[in-house]
Each structure stands twice: as structure tokens, then as C-alpha cells.
Image: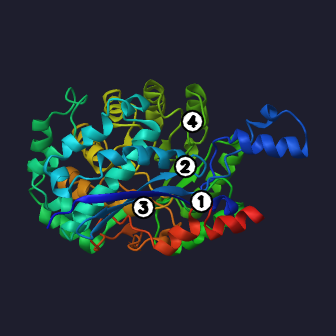
Amino acid sequence: MSHRIINMTVRDVRFPTSLEQHGSDAMVSLYRFTRRINKRTRLRPLLFLSTLQHTDPDYSVAYVVLDTESGLKGFGFTFTLGKGTEIVVSAVQALAGLVVGKSLEEIVSNFREFYRLLTSDGQMRWLGPEKGVIQLATAAVLNAVWDLWARAEDKPLWKLLVDMDPKKIVSCIDFRYITDVLTEEEALDILVKAQEGKQQRENQMLNEGYPAYTTSCAWLGYTDQQLKQLCTDALKSGWTKFKVKVGADLQDDMRRCRLIRQMIGPNSTLMIDANQRWDVDEAISWVSALAEVKPLWIEEPTSPDDILGHAAISKALAPLGIGVATGEQCHNRVMFKQFLQASALQFVQIDSCRVGSVNENLAVLLMAHKFRVPVCPHAGGVGLCELVQHLILFDYICVSADLNNRMCEYVDHLHEHFRSPVVIKNAHYMAPKDAGYSCEMFESSVETHQYPEGGVWKLHMKK
């Protein structure tokens, strides 16, 4: 049966998570604080930027649905933080002409060429290339295509990939700009070698799941009482790996990190995340001061584009046994290539919506394996956990065959809006069983949270 795409829709769906400080971190939001300070104190806002934090993320998606003449649908999205989602929606709509009219069979028979079609339009390429809003839109569209493919094969996406012939996997990847680090032949060799023991690893994932860590306990906007209660609950549920947001105030970070380390004990794993807050030298100094709590890594210590800055931080922190993790805002495979070449990270954090969907993440997984750097994906937000679990299962079963220092982020927000939500048991992601890429949301959730006409937003705006 042919699955020709006859229509593509995209909607702006937002959740008001800022009301409860979910997702709060150390990155300054100038607009929010300018408004607050001018209204209450009438002082110059720049005086306060060094002490204030980003407290207003509204987890959101540009939600894509592909309709086919067979009746089968594909669902996909890309993640945002509220304002600006409408820009991504416009970018998705600009790509529609490259997608509608094509059949799924035509796309997957030469997926690399289709990927290049989306990223190499003679005029839209100027908006990237392969980065920023246009790449977020590309990810949303391609996520829907992969979901459609998995549904057509009646398999969850991870199983579609695991069962795929290595040559077919390689044919989905665009190796342009990365052949100096990874050639098609090398990628194929990695995948072929990993065939040994593949079934045993698949069985292991089906029985035990993939190890996870939690970020839900220690958002920067949470009170000490919240931290204590959430850590206590997490420990009772079997969690042993915790991430703490830092970067607003060093003394406050010291106090909070000591508090959490005391609660979780010396044998649990602790990570810290600065969300791009510092300059290079400041990052080295700040993290060195936090070394006493023994963090495994510092995440996004500086600008996500500063590869050499990350390399300097990595070198300085190595004697303290602290690694650098980054990647959730890496634009594309080329940036990951350079991070790996420069030894600028010790933990690769792929994201299911930042780069060009599964296609580009396959390239990153293979490069990370070649450089022997563990992959610990970024997740959370809305739907990121649902998607990235498929990629990390594939990585273990078919690429890395290694769980040493590997774990996938988990945040306990908004899963109830998905038809196939993640399943966590004993702090492990359990392998999804439903066909597709776990992208589909309940239509009632989409309608209620569509911006600005959804019922939630009409009520919120009245307040």
C-alpha cells in the first residue's frame, strides 16, 4: 500500500509550566525582569541581571501531523520554550511544499537525498544552513516522517532501527562535512561489528530497561523544602542519579549542592547544569569551588557554540575528575564533530529535536562511538523523553554495546498528554512497545493547549 503524503498541518501547542517554576535555571530572562523591575522599583534592570534567573519557560511544541492517502498518519514535533513557537510553525509551513505529494516509499528509498532536499533548498538554506529555527522545523517534519515509517512497519522506532540492515541505516545519514572524521565505510564497519551480541542486548533492554537520571528534583526556582521532599521521594523510588541546576549565585549553589549530596549519599551520582551561564574562566573557577560535592559533570558551562571554550574548561577540570557535558543546543553534526575533535566534551548530549531528527542523530551516535565518548541524551521538556528513549536504545543495542557512564535524562512533566508515554521502572526507561516514534499527543490536549485559542490560554490570559 502506498502512503503518499497528501497534507501536512502544524500547530503551536504550549503548556504554562512557568507557573510552577518547572524548568527554571540560571539563564537570565531580560524581558521578564525588565518588566518586573521597572514596575516595582523603577531601577535600571542591568543592575540586577547577575542575581536573577530564568524562571519563565513555558514548555511548548510545534506539532506536525502528516496525512496520507492510505489513512495512516505520522506525528512529529520540535520543542521550544513558549514565545517564538509561532516562528518555528512558520518555518515548518515553509517546508510543506517539499514534503506534500511525496510517498513514504519514495522518501525512505533514498532518505539521505530527502534529508538534503529539506536542508538544501536554494533559498531557505540561507536561513541556516542546518541550524537555528529552520533546523528545528526540519526536525519536526522528519520526526513525523520517521513516526510514519515506524507505524507503516508496525514497530516502535527503536525496533525499526534495530532490525534495519546496517547498509540501510548508513543510507539514511548525510555524511557531507563529516567524512574527515567518519566515512560511510567506517560507519558501516561499526554497525556490522555491533551485530555480535545484539540480540542479547535487545533482550536486556526489554527486561531491564535503560538507566535514567532525574532532573525533576532540583530546578533552580524550587525551595529547599521542595528539594528535600522531591529528593526523598526519588530515593524511595529507586533513583540514584541526580542533576542540579546551578549558576545564579555561588554560595547558594554550594548550599543547595551540599544539601542534595547529603540527602542522596556519597554513592549516588550527582551532575550539575549551568545552562550556558558563565564565561570560560568564570566556569572553571565556579565549578572548581563546587568540586567538593563530586559532580560527574558540569553541563553547558558556557556558550553552546564555544567549542574551544569548552575544550579549555574540560582541560582545567580534568584533574578534579569533573567532565563537561553539552549538546542539547548543538546545531548539527558538524558542531558535534568539532567538539569531539577538540576533546571539548566528555559526555555527548544528543537532543531529538535540535538537530535534523533521527538522520542526523545517527551520525552523532556513530561519531561519539568512534571517539569513545559516552552518549547521555538531553530530555525533559514536553515529549523529549518520549522521543530520545528510542535513540538511546538503538545506540546501546546497535552501536556502543556499552552502559559505562551512560544514562538518559528524565523529567517527570507532561507525559500524560501522549498516547504512548514513557514508562519508568526502577529508574530505567522501559523499551516502548507501541508502533511509531511516541510523538502522538491526545487531540484533546492539543486543542486545549493550542496557542492562543486553546482553553488553557484563554483562561490564563484573563488572569
336 is higher (above) or lower (below) than 429 = above
* Residue 332 drawn at (x, y percent): 36, 37
Task: Confirm whether residue 425 shows in the render.
Answer: no
Secondary element type, mark 4? helix
Q: Which mark is residue 86?
A: 2
Amino acid type assigned to the residue bearing label 4 in the image: Ser
Judging by the rendered image, the residue that carries numbered circle 4 is: 288
Amino acid type assigned to the residue bearing label 1 in the image: Tyr
Secondary element type, mark 2? helix
Q: Is residue 14 left or right of residue 153?
A: right
Secondary element type, mark 3? helix
* Residue 59 drawn at (x, y percent): 56, 57
Residue under the image location 31 percent in, 32 percent down:
337
Asked whether the residues under the numbered discs 1 and 2 touch, taking CB atoms below 8 Å apart as contact, a structural biologist would say yes
In primary-sequence order, the first of circles 3 and 4 is 4
Task: Confirm whether residue 55 shows in the render.
Answer: yes
Count residues near mark 4 (Cα–Cα under 10 Å), then give few for <14, some for 14-19, many for 20+. Answer: some
Amino acid type assigned to the residue bearing label 2 in the image: Glu
**Quadrant, the C terminus:** bottom right
Residue under the image location 20 percent in, 67 percent down:
152
- Residue farthest to the right? 41
Q: Is residue 88 left or right of residue 218?
A: left
Q: CA distance from mark 2 to mark 3?
A: 23 Å
